[in-house]
Amino acid sequence: MTTDVRAMLERDLAGVGPARFDLSDLELLRRHRRRREALISLAVALALLAGGVIGMLRTLSPEPRVPADRTARPPSVDLRQVVLGEAATPLRARFQARDRGEEALQVGLPVDGLPADDANALMTTGFVQAERTVFERVGEPSLHDAALETWAAEYDSPDTARAALGVFLEETVLVNYMDWGLIEPRPVALDGADEGSLYIDRAIPRDVVYLWRHENLLLRVTTQGNFPPSDVRRIAEAMDARATAARR
Amino acid sequence: MTKQALRLDAIRAADTDLSVPLTFEEFFRLERDHLFGTLCLITGDRDEAEELAQEAFTTVWERWDRVQGMDNPAGYVHRVATNAFRKRYRRQMVLRRVLPHFAEREHEGSAEAPAFLHEALAALTPRQRAALVLTELWGFSAAEAGRALGVRASTIGALKHQGRNTLRERADDDD
């Protein structure tokens, strides 16, 4: 089959024909890049200058300075009650770490998934809070890299949560950063989820990512290694139920 | 040494005095059609392949003083192009999910397989085709191809496996 595939590729390659661009096209592209870089440098310089002026004005201002409020509104849900906490550590697992706020939002995202500004804008628009807990598998030395992560993020509306979901889904599905990525996701149903959302890898069944939207919350359970899929699903369903209960 | 490096060396041995450093113009002449062709196979789109190839060659041109001293400049330009493909492909996937109308536009534009691509190959995903092109045509190892596409080496194995299965199923259907 290897030879057949190569022969097929080489035959198609021969049928493509020659490229229609030459050095003059590359020269145009180089000039365009130089102009763009010059404009970016200018914009950065102007921004720094403006920042300096604003900073000076603030220093001179008699009013007390308050930190910029990046959140759209105060949290409405206690996410510590939604993710899996230390007290509910699954069997044969050990609590490892907890992150909160934007730190929890960023973890796991590769820097080159999207232009950083685009990804950041989509992730942080309407962002309110996030909580993440990580557990490691114990008792199986050969599977020392096995891990389970539960994560929840609140946005100010279902619409902003939906936009952010697109980014997280993309990052989760197509990149194997930290070995969390999925090769071929398969959506499956979950009662209570508002949007398309549970993904189990076909190619590597032991890697499971459940990522879904529940109104203005994004919820995720990720496992790598020898965690029984039925247990992972139960954790996801319990998280979804706790998200519902936390609103009452 | 990869197949690319061997190929470039063979061409250089025939055409060029090895004691003279390869100029970018010579390198471009040697590699243009091959890079463009393989990008056509990966993307299934001549225009996109042309844009990616131009981007990659321009990047290499800007860094030529460093690239020309590399053991395998051809491998480098192929990696730059693959990286650009990966970023573009990922961006398209995000846009499809975030902006539904974009997906509709894309769908309208890709209704038919390009004439240069065998029907069975056109049935593969771009990632599966990329894994096969990188390993079968470019001679990359699974680890090298994984680095180029931003995935694990085992993922390359899985993508190739999936691609071959699809090709085999298509071949069976034709029989």
Image: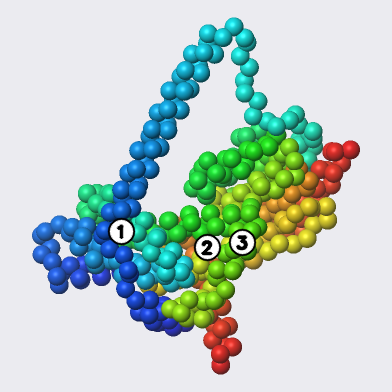
Above-or-below relation of B156 to A58? below
Residue on which the image places disc 3: B103
Q: What residue type is labelled 1?
A: Asp
Viewer-nearest residue: A18 or A226? A18
**What chain does mark 1 sit on?**
A
Q: Is mark 2 on a helix, strand or loop?
A: helix
| Residue A7 in the figure: left or right of residue B74 | right
| Residue A14 in the figure: left or right of residue B129 | left
Q: Which amino acid does label 3 sit on?
A: Ala
Q: What element carries label 3?
A: helix
Residue on which the image places disc 1: A25
> The C terminus of chain A lies in which quarter of the figure?
top right
Q: From the top left corner, tell me how far across and down residue B105 is, in percent.
A: 59, 63
Q: Which of marks 2 and 3 is in front?
A: 3
Task: Report the residue at 74% width, 49% height from top.
Answer: A213
Viewer-nearest residue: A9 or B101? B101
Q: Which of marks 2 and 1 is in front?
A: 1
**What chain does mark 2 sit on?**
B
Viewer-nearest residue: B136 or A157? A157
Residue A173: which numbered mark, if any? Answer: none
